[in-house]
Image (cartoon, helix red, strand yellow):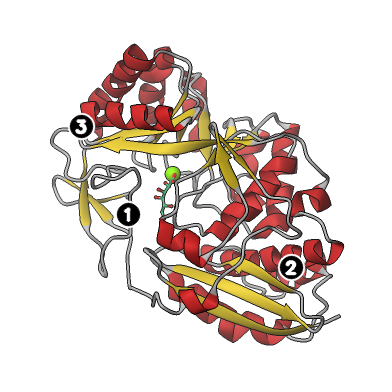
């Protein structure tokens, strides 16, 4: 059996997506997601120029060998472009293998560990009152877990604040929008949000908060402590984690659970965080971390240290990633939670899928493969739109972490 052809499909049904389609000589095909928000075309070039020419003629059943070939064979290791290209190939190959086996992907991974997958949605508002309302909307929709973000007085476009709908798209302009940040103001404001949320809705629901790499370790520890009475499910990316050791200080000063991983690509980027039990949740995704083959290694390492998964699942990860993630989550023993920012109707139409939401849980389908396809004719009607992620500056103009 051979890979006959491969193509990269770029489309923008409301936002940009890069999709890989691998076709075999037996007619079975597989689909993978290769989207890198704000840097999409770099992955397109990597796939078209450096990956696809090698893939054609290979045996698609050799998933592990192809993964090693693309990772070790590049000589240059890690990085978001390489690892997303590998992820796209890996997702498509697992899709093909599961279709050949006539099984839904989770069966190949080891079978079902749970009935459904708890997901969290994104509630946001320009101020605390708006966020409290938005959380109420999610509760009405049946969500059991909700991430809450709010505007902060005196900060221009604080992270996570949408523009009036349930979801938001941060990649909003052809050149980066400049947003603001002020740690002292946020440290005073964020605990007030969670105080209000618990006073309004009680403690039944899981609440989460994304710090988006904004605080220093000491500031993150201060925030974690201030949030302890409100019993969050986690605070996410509370400080940049290139230096994994930074989490030692935070961990020793707060019992608020910590989550890290969406910007990282390999097991090496989270190894110290996991092995020192400095985090509670590892948030690497199928797309970000080299596909199912590599994410499984990360999850297995995490399981040894009682660290659970919490896959990144923003709208810039296409329904193809969501489909793979749900099969993965249905199997993985140390599952924590899955992020689920709903895609737009336009996106859902381009990517027909069989997963479904019910009472706060997502359920993967039973169709052979990962259960997500691409309608190429429809995709062609939504051409690529250049869109960058914002940058952040402090009040004095200093560039900060967006
Ligand atoms: C999240 C993320 C996203 C990212 C986005 C960048 O937790 O969902 O932080 O909102 O900002 O994926 O492309
Ligand atoms: Mg995040």
Q: Quadrant of residue 383?
A: bottom left
The residues bearing labels 3 and 2 have C-alpha atoms spaced at a distance of 45 Å
Mark 3, secondary structure of its residue = loop
Q: Are marks 1 and 3 in contact (CB under 8 Å)?
A: no
> Does the closest atom of ligand 1 sit within 8 Å of the Cβ of label 2?
no
The image's mark for residue 399 is none
Residue occupied by mark 1: 170
Q: Earlier in the sequence, mark 1 or mark 3?
A: 3
Horizontal and vertical percent position of residue 31: 64, 69
Pointer 3 local density, CA inside 10 Å: few below 14, some 14–19, many at least 20: some
- Residue at 58 percent of width and 60 percent of height: 320
Residue occupied by mark 3: 127
Q: State the residue in front, 242 or 213.
A: 213
Q: Earlier in the sequence, mark 3 or mark 2?
A: 2
Quarter the N terminus occupies? bottom right
Horizontal and vertical percent position of residue 200: 32, 15
> Does the closest atom of ligand 1 sit within 8 Å of the Cβ of label 1?
yes
195 vs 93: above or below: above
156 vs 88: above or below: above
Q: Quadrant of residue 70?
A: bottom right
Q: Earlier in the sequence, mark 2 or mark 1?
A: 2
The residues bearing labels 1 and 3 have C-alpha atoms spaced at a distance of 18 Å
Mark 1, secondary structure of its residue = loop
Horizontal and vertical percent position of residue 324: 65, 54
The image's mark for residue 93 is 2
Q: Is residue 77 visible?
A: no
Q: Quadrant of residue 199?
A: top left
- Residue at 44 percent of width and 53 percent of height: 343
Q: State the residue in front, 105 or 62.
A: 105
Pointer 1 local density, CA inside 10 Å: few below 14, some 14–19, many at least 20: many
């Amino acid at each position: 059996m051979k890979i006959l052809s491969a193509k990269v499909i770029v489309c923008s049904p409301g936002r940009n997506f890069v999709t890989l389609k691998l076709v075999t000589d037996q007619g079975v095909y597989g689909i993978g997601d290769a989207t890198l928000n704000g840097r999409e075309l770099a992955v397109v070039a990597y796939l078209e120029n450096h990956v696809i020419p090698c893939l054609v003629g290979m045996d698609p059943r050799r998933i592990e060998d192809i993964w090693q070939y693309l990772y070790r064979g590049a000589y240059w290791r890690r990085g978001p472009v390489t690892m997303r290209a590998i992820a796209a190939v890996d997702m498509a190959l697992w899709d093909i293998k599961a279709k050949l086996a006539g099984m839904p992907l989770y069966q190949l991974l080891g079978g079902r560990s749970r009935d459904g997958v708890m997901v969290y949605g994104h509630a946001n508002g320009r101020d605390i009152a708006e966020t409290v309302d938005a959380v109420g909307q999610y509760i009405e929709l049946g969500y059991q877990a909700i991430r809450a973000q709010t505007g902060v007085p005196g900060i221009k476009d604080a992270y996570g604040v949408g523009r009036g709908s349930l979801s938001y798209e941060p990649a909003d302009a052809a050149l980066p929008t400049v947003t603001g940040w002020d740690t002292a103001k946020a440290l005073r404001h964020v605990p007030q949000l969670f105080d209000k949320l618990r006073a309004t809705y009680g403690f039944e629901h899981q609440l989460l908060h994304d710090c988006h790499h904004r605080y220093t370790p000491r500031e993150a520890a201060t925030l974690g402590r201030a949030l302890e009475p409100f019993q969050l499910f986690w605070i996410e990316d509370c400080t940049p984690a290139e230096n994994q050791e930074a989490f030692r200080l935070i961990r020793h000063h707060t019992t608020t659970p910590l989550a890290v991983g969406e910007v990282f690509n390999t097991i090496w980027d989270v190894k110290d965080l996991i092995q020192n039990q400095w985090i509670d949740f590892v948030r690497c995704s199928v797309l970000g971390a080299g596909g199912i083959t590599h994410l499984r290694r990360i999850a297995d390492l995490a399981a040894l240290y009682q660290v659970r998964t919490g896959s990144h699942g923003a709208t810039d990860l296409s329904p193809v990633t969501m489909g793979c993630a749900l099969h993965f989550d249905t199997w993985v023993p140390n599952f924590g939670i899955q992020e689920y920012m709903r895609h737009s109707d336009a996106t859902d139409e381009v990517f027909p899928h069989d997963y479904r939401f019910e009472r706060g849980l997502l359920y993967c389908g039973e169709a052979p493969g990962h259960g997500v396809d691409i309608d190429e004719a429809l995709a062609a009607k939504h051409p690529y739109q250049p869109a960058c992620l914002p940058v952040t500056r402090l009040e004095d103009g200093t560039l900060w972490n967006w």
